[in-house]
Image (cartoon, rainbow, N blue to C red):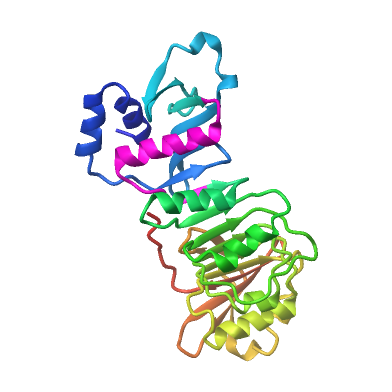
């Protein structure tokens, strides 16, 4: 039985709640995620999202439907079944309180911790609340916060010590920069990466590094490639930077004797499930024998893919 159906069944009686809580042993496919964007709890894998229980403002609940209630945290909450997803939607006067209440209910029911949050407003409060309520620290944050976002970006990439995966969708002011080292982050995906400098890049220790709208130059990426060849950023499996203009020969400047042109198409999937098609790439080998393919893509993106492909335990 799927997780959303189990949640619905748990409200039927105290007995059904107890049976689900004590007897269910099979692990769920994916992580439990709190989404402030969608106001819901879901189990997420790399490619799918299965909603478990949602929150909505009570103003959107028609009076004619206020006959269906479930009990959570000592209060009776109006609910209805989502028309397309099939999960229960709960209605609240305060959706933030509602999101916290359904989180407490589901984590207690399934004896599971929250692994991921998607945050649009109260980033600090959400991370602090989740980390304070459980022993296992958060693994991932997806941040889409309004300006000013500078202090939140600094917190995520430099000061927060627990998160291993970060996706930043927010824009930063044109003159925004971060001084000093980035902390160790397994997967860093920055949609608007104009503020990331070569000095920042050379301090990174990551597995997947994805930079959209990057201001890095071809000479910057040449410096990063030489940095990797010298044994730095040793965990790297995939680097992508979309600059809009890539000159592969400038990127490979001074390294031509060490590269092998590969015309054939190769499909590459990184540990965090970013997929790239590598055509007309250049293979380059590090002193320890590790090979990377350097490839220019049609949308002005430089890709550095390190072989062999490896998988990551997402749960």
Q: Quadrant of the N terminus?
A: top left
Judged from this view, the residue extending furthest toward the top is 64
Seen at 40% across and 63% down, the residue is 311
Q: Nearer the viewer, residue 54 or 136?
A: 136
x, y percent for residue 129: 48, 49
x, y percent for residue 286: 51, 86
Does residue 2 sit above or below 223 in this rendering? Answer: above
Seen at 35% across and 46% down, the residue is 29
Tell me, yes or no, whether the highlighted magenta stretch contains residue 103: yes
Q: Nearer the viewer, residue 122 or 140?
A: 122
Q: Is residue 78 visible?
A: yes
**Span shown in magenta:** 92-117
Q: Quadrant of the C terminus?
A: bottom left
Residue 150 location, quadrant:
bottom right
**50 left or right, relative to 199:** left
Seen at 60% across and 20% down, the residue is 59
Does residue 250 sit above or below 12 in this rendering? Answer: below
**211 left or right, relative to 56:** right
x, y percent for residue 89: 47, 26
């Amino acid at each position: 039985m799927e997780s959303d159906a189990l949640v619905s069944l748990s409200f039927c009686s105290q007995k059904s709640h107890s049976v689900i809580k004590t007897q269910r042993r099979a692990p769920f496919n994916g992580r439990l995620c709190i989404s402030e964007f969608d106001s819901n709890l879901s189990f997420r894998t790399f490619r799918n999202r299965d909603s478990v229980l949602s929150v909505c403002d009570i103003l959107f609940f028609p009076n004619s439907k206020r006959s269906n209630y479930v009990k959570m945290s000592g209060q009776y909450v109006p609910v209805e079944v989502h028309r397309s997803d099939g999960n229960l939607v709960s209605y609240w006067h305060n959706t933030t309180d509602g999101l916290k209440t359904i989180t407490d209910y589901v984590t207690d029911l399934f004896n599971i911790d929250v692994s991921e949050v998607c945050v649009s407003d109260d980033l600090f409060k959400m991370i602090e609340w989740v980390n304070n309520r459980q022993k296992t620290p958060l693994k991932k944050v997806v941040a889409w916060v309004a300006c000013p976002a500078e202090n939140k970006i600094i917190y995520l990439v430099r000061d927060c010590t627990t998160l291993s995966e970060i996706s930043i969708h927010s824009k930063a002011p044109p003159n925004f920069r971060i001084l000093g080292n980035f902390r160790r982050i397994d997967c860093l995906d920055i949609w608007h990466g104009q503020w990331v400098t070569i000095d920042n890049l050379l301090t990174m220790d990551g597995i997947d590094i994805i930079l959209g709208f990057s201001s890095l130059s071809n000479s910057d990426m040449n410096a990063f490639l030489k940095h990797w060849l010298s044994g730095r950023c040793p965990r790297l499996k995939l680097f992508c930077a979309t600059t809009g203009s890539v000159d592969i020969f400038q990127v490979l400047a001074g390294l031509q004797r060490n590269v092998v042109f590969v015309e054939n198409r190769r499909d590459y999937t990184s540990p965090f499930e970013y997929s790239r098609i590598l055509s007309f790439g250049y293979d380059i080998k590090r002193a320890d024998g590790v090979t990377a393919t350097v490839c220019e893509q049609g949308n002005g993106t430089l890709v550095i893919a390190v072989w062999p492909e490896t998988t990551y335990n997402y749960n």
